[in-house]
Image: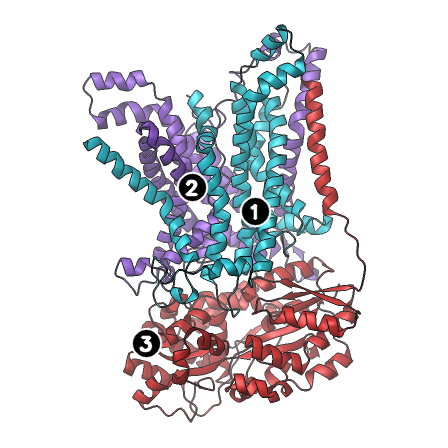
Chain colours: A red, B purple, C cyan
């Protein structure tokens, strides 16, 4: 064939291009202090600031470089878990959503926390976050900030309905106000993590848990859903759904959209995280004077509520090449000053009690004392290595909310047990 | 997602092939392969080899690995519990209502989108075929925008338009309280609309080439004989386009059966909008259940093959021959 | 006259069909965040460029700009390699007679219908082991599996239509083999190669599943995957405006290519069948 030579030349060129690509992918040398990579959840830039601050404070011992995780917690976990399982050594510091901690701690993906760090950074921490940072009785992560939900209300609506907000209120009461006044409750009805948050808070407020104990194996996991408390939780959620008390968009309403509902003409009550305060200040400053807050609503009028617990824990990858430096950095990041600053600039409440004494905090967040008490009463979501299954299964059965009946808790429990035994798809 | 592949008349058959050497060679008796034939074979593989090997490596190895993994109960975060379960995962998959529900949704999306696209695509092909010169370029440019646009972008465009909070569609149709993504049927309408919008241009271009294949003498003759537009369409044009239509339908059906991006963005499978691709993704990547997820993946793969085989054998779609009759 | 009006109506209908969703997201990209709450509307209440500022100069800069660079770089490299390899392969298919030719084409066909989801998890594990995870090459290789099949098919069809005997005629007329190839064959083959490149570019540009599964940092994450990382002032806010602005930016290359090369793209997608 007369073309054979030419074709070989083309082929050689093609191979050369491919090889060049390969070579470029490798290489790159390193000088200077070790670089720690901190995988951060999206925020308003606060973690990047703290990383720079701690890099400087270390005096050249380490350099922290941040890397962004996806927006929702489930995708964050998805990415971290896959890479930890693969033994990735670049995961030095990770911002973790508390419910996913057991899944990563159980197989030993997280480096053990040195006692000095535990002593320094857990004694001053609110109760809820302290519980959330442990697995099997040991600290596996360090609380960075702690989140909880408050009951926010529109003063004008409450006044019209004649509800006394100086005392704790119940779900039944706020549902009644919504019925009477034709307003909408800002709750999260979307099929997502926020549904688990809601169900969990309703259960824990009655002293019952979705998952009882903290068994580490799938077939020993005990559930508390199939109980009178579960039925009561289902009654509240189902009623709000069926009566349309959450507004027309309830089935796709997440935290941000329930805030829009609350800010709208038909807003009345809302259960939500403190981010709504700075967000409302910038989006609807005219509303601020009409907004009040109190602790999370009770289920039973005589039992203190157990507000949801969120926030971020910092974990260090077991395969990190610099675990000691990483814990040094974690200690710096979680200092009370940094936590207070993070609260003021990014609206995410501190896990450290001392941070609440910062005068700036009180000035920027008048509800800080309520947040702090709520955090002490807050109960974590189910602590199990199978949290993802539990949460996803729950979300599937409890949405759309108008279909939730008194059968739902028992059915969910049955379904979850089958899923954990590997007998069902999710 | 849409790995828009399309048929080709030329290559497979080899019958219409080429010039000089190749033709002569074929006339020679098989057993005595000449030196030249060997050299040509060598060169052929040298040229085709890199592409061939690369394509196979990236697909065959992973699917074999998935088939192997599917025989285990294996969770990524609990590697010590990994256990051989034989075909147990497949047993779970095939007896689970979730699988069948997702299969149903996938099939529904495939059938409806392809049917609508066929009609819409044919209309667009007719328009492009008979448009006057000046308009042709404009129409083609417009049609190609959805073809080239990123599926995820299309998904966001449709999502934001219909979403109860950000969208304007509700106020246009006077239904401010309609939560499109809050229930399966309405969510599927938007998902399918986005899919149809994005992929109709492809089908319509294939049909356009099919239209051009219809011998103009036939249509002219029918016209002279006094056939109406509809008679010409149903008796002359459509029968002559059958091959092109079948190819277009098959390729789009296989593409639609793998739908992922649109649903992932708009509902993430909530409220009965989950398809098999999403189930596979959620099981193996979301839940990290590599064993079970691989089983779903393998089933999805086999179903795609099955559809292709049924179409090729059952309806005699000549993929390699493309629109050629 | 009636005919003219008819065509005007048809043209407008087609234009609305094809461009309305693009227009819709373009309008979104000029809305300020307040425009998205309390019942949206098609046009921005006030036209604002804050979303574009955010993705180019503001908070989302470190997310979007590397993603744009990755998308462009990875897609272009994958396109070039795919076209080079497909050209070699298609030449062999169109011009040479070798055993296994049908296997090559059959494989290309089979791979073009392969569900990406089915192979992405094993690929993730393999990439982790050999260090291709979260690298450009780690996306370029799977993109080749997306683009090669269609490139091979398109190019084989083009090459089959080239009157190769012209080359021999040129040689008879005294041209050297190289001259004959360069002056006669290359000009004939180039449009096909170019068209193939456009189609391959669109396919690689469109990828989402590989992008979200095989990357983890701004080192290789392409734009479609990065859209899921956009966030507003809080972690709970999905910034519709910024996402729309980023979506418009990645749509611009598509629109430009389509406007410049519509004729070539249409012929690339249809010609094989037309000539049949």
Is the residue B10 above or below the residue C14 in the image?
A: above
Q: Give the residue at x 43% y 35%.
A: B250
Q: The residue tagged with tag 1: helix, strand or loop?
A: helix
Q: Which of B72/A46 is in front?
A: A46
Q: Give the residue at x 51% y 48%.
A: C250
Label 2: chain?
A: B
Q: Label 3, label 1: how many angstroms apart (C-alpha)? A: 47 Å
Q: Quadrant of residue A5?
A: top right
Q: Which residue is mark 1?
A: C118
Label 3: chain?
A: A
Q: Which of C239/A377 is in front?
A: C239
Q: Label 1, label 2: how many angstroms apart (C-alpha)? A: 29 Å
Q: Are marks 1 and 2 on the same chain?
A: no
Residue A32: image location, x then y, percent? 81, 62
Q: Which residue is mark 2?
A: B145
Is the residue A133 above or below the residue C192 in the image?
A: below
Q: Is residue B130 left or right of residue B275?
A: left
The image's mark for residue A266 is 3
| Mark 3 surroundings: few (<14), some (14-19) or many (≥20) residues within 10 A | some
Q: Quadrant of residue C44?
A: bottom left
Label 1: chain?
A: C
């Amino acid at each position: 064939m007369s073309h054979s030579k030419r074709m070989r030349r083309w082929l050689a060129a093609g191979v050369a291009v491919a090889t060049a690509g390969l070579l470029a992918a490798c290489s790159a040398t390193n000088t200077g202090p070790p670089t720690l990579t901190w995988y951060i959840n999206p925020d308003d830039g606060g973690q990047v600031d703290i990383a720079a601050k701690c890099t400087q404070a270390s005096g050249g011992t380490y350099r922290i470089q941040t890397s962004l995780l996806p927006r929702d917690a489930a995708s964050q976990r998805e990415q971290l878990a896959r890479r930890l399982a693969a033994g990735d050594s670049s995961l030095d510091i990770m911002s973790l959503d508390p419910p996913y901690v057991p899944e990563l701690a159980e197989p030993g993906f997280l480096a053990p926390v040195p006692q000095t760090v535990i002593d320094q950074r857990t004694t001053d921490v609110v109760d809820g976050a302290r519980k959330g940072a442990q697995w099997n009785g040991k600290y596996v992560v360090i609380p960075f900030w702690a989140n909880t939900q408050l009951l926010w209300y529109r003063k004008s609506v409450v006044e019209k309905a004649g509800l006394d907000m100086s005392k704790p209120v119940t779900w039944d009461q706020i549902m009644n106000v919504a019925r009477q006044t034709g307003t909408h409750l800002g709750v999260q009805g979307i099929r997502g993590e926020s549904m688990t948050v809601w169900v969990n808070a309703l259960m824990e407020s009655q002293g019952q848990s979705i998952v009882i104990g903290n068994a580490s194996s799938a077939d020993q996991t005990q559930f508390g859903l199939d109980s009178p408390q579960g039925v009561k939780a289902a009654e509240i959620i189902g009623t709000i759904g069926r009566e349309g008390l959450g507004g027309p968009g309830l089935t796709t309403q997440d935290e941000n959209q329930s805030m829009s509902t609350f800010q709208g003409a038909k807003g009345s009550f809302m259960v939500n995280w403190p981010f709504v305060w700075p967000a409302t200040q910038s989006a609807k400053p005219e509303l601020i004077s009409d907004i009040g807050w109190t602790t999370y609503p009770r289920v039973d009028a005589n039992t203190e509520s157990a507000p949801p617990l969120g926030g971020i824990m910092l974990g260090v990858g077991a395969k990190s090449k610099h675990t000691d430096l990483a814990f040094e950095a974690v200690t710096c990041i979680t200092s009370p000053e940094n936590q207070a600053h993070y609260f003021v600039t990014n609206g995410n409440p501190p896990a450290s009690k001392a941070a609440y004494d910062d005068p700036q905090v009180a000035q920027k967040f008048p509800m800080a004392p309520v947040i702090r008490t709520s955090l002490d009463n807050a109960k974590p979501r189910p602590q199990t290595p199978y949290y993802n299954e539990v949460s996803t299964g729950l979300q599937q059965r409890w949405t759309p909310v108008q279909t939730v009946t008194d059968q739902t808790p028992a059915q969910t429990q049955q379904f979850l047990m089958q899923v954990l035994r590997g007998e069902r798809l999710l | 997602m849409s790995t828009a592949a399309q048929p080709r008349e030329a290559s497979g058959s080899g019958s219409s092939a080429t010039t000089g050497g190749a033709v002569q060679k074929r006339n020679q008796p098989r057993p005595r392969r000449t030196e030249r034939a060997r050299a040509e074979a060598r060169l052929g593989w040298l040229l085709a080899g890199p592409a061939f090997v690369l394509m196979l490596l990236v697909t065959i190895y992973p699917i074999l690995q998935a088939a192997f993994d599917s025989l285990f109960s294996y969770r990524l975060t609990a590697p010590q519990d990994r256990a051989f379960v034989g075909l147990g995962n497949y047993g779970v998959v095939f007896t689970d209502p979730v699988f069948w529900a997702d299969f149903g949704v996938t099939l529904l999306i495939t059938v409806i989108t392809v049917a609508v696209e066929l009609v819409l695509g044919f209309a667009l092909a007719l328009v492009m075929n008979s448009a006057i010169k000046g308009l042709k370029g404009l129409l083609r440019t417009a049609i190609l925008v959805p073809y080239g646009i990123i599926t995820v972008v299309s998904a966001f465009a449709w999502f934001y338009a219909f979403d109860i909070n950000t969208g304007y569609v509700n106020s246009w149709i006077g239904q401010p309280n309609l939560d499109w993504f809050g229930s399966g049927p309405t969510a599927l309408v938007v998902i399918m609309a986005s899919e149809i919008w994005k992929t109709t241009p492809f089908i319509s271009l294939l049909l356009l080439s099919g239209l051009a294949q219809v011998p103009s003498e036939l249509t002219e003759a029918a016209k002279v004989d006094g056939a109406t537009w509809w008679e010409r369409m149903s008796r002359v044009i459509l029968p002559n386009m059958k091959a092109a239509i079948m190819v277009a339908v098959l390729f789009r059906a296989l593409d639609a059966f793998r739908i992922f991006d649109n649903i992932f963005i708009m509902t993430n499978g909530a409220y009965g909008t989950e398809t098999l691709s999403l189930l596979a993704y959620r099981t193996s990547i979301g839940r990290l259940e590599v064993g079970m997820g691989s089983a779903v993946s393998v089933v999805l793969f086999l179903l795609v093959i099955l559809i292709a085989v049924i179409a090729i054998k059952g309806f005699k779609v000549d993929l390699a021959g493309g629109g050629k009759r | 006259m009636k005919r003219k009006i008819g065509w005007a109506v048809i043209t407008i209908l087609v234009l609305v069909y094809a461009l309305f969703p693009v227009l819709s997201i373009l309008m979104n990209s000029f809305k300020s965040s307040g425009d998205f709450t309390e019942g949206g509307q098609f046009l921005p209440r006030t036209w604002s460029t804050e979303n574009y500022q955010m993705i180019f100069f503001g908070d989302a800069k470190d997310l979007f700009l590397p993603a744009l660079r990755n998308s462009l770089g990875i897609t272009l490299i994958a396109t070039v390699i795919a076209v080079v390899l497909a050209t070699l392969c298609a030449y062999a298919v169109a011009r040479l007679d070798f055993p296994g030719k049908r296997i090559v084409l059959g494989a290309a066909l089979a791979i073009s219908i392969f569900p990406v989801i089915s192979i992405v998890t094993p690929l993730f594990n393999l990439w982790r082991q050999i260090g291709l995870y979260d690298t450009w090459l780690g996306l370029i290789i799977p993109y080749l599996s997306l683009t090669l099949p269609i490139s091979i098919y398109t190019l084989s069809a083009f090459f089959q239509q080239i009157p190769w005997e012209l080359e021999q005629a040129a040689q008879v007329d005294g041209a050297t083999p190289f001259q004959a190839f360069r002056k006669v064959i290359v000009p004939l083959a180039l449009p096909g190669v170019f068209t193939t490149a456009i189609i391959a570019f669109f396919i690689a540009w469109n990828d989402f599943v590989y992008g979200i599964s095989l990357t983890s940092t701004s080192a290789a994450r392409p734009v479609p995957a990065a859209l899921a990382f956009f966030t507003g002032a809080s972690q709970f806010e999905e910034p519709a405006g910024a996402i729309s602005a980023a979506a418009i930016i990645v749509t611009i290359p598509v629109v430009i290519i389509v406007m410049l090369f519509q004729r070539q793209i249409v012929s690339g997608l249809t010609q094989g069948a037309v000539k049949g």
